[in-house]
Image (spheres, coloured by chain):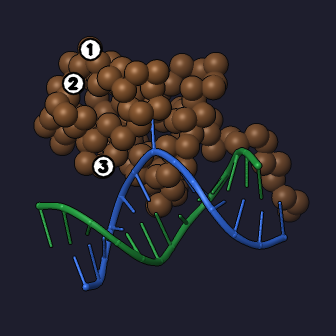
Chain colours: A brown, B blue, C green
Amino acid sequence: MGKQPKDQSNFFADVYEVVKLIPSGRVSSYGAIARYLGLSRGARMVGWAMMSSHYSTEQVPAHRVVNRQGLLTGRRHYPTPTQMQERLEAEGIPVKDEQVQNFDHYFWDPSRELL
DNA sequence: ATGTTGACTGCGT
DNA sequence: AACGCAGCCAACA
């Protein structure tokens, strides 16, 4: 068995796929997505992929991905620091002070919800 | 090839 | 409960 062609960051593509599966009105976390992809501690990678998603032509709802505390840690990578929050609120997710309210209720875990 | 960094997370203090 | 340190993977200089 030779080595597998690494393609070009097909890891990013996998992350995009999972993120695109997050239903509107729900949020997920970097760690949950990483774990679903088999990376027990690749949460930072997921964040990296999200940042790259801005340069991708694919539409990835990166605003639905927050950290495990429900904090909008990625908001500073948006054109305006409030865009991420506004987008979540537009989907019916209450956000106060950079934090998703009732986070546990809106949390969507690919390993749990998705099979 | 080596070192640094990053939209994180878990555990120890 | 809050803070700090270490682990993990991939891109970049």
Crowding near the residue tagged with mark 1, few <14, some 14–19, many ≥20 C-alpha atoms within 10 Å = few
Task: Tell which subunit mark 2 falls on.
Answer: A
Q: Which mark is residue A90?
A: 1
Q: Which mark is residue A93?
A: 2
- Residue drawn 39% across and 49% down? A32
Q: How many marks?
A: 3
Inspect the image, locate mark 3, and give the three-letter code of the amino acid beneath it: Arg
Badge 3 or badge 1: first in the primary sequence = 3
Inspect the image, locate mark 1, and give the three-letter code of the amino acid beneath it: Ala
Q: Secondary structure at mark 1?
A: helix
Crowding near the residue tagged with mark 2, few <14, some 14–19, many ≥20 C-alpha atoms within 10 Å = many
Please say if A47 is above or below A89: below
Separation of marks 1 and 2 at Cα, in angstroms? 7 Å
Residue denoted by label 3 = A68
Labels 3 and 1 share a subunit: yes
Residue A62, percent from left and from top: 45, 29
Separation of marks 2 and 3 at Cα, in angstroms? 16 Å
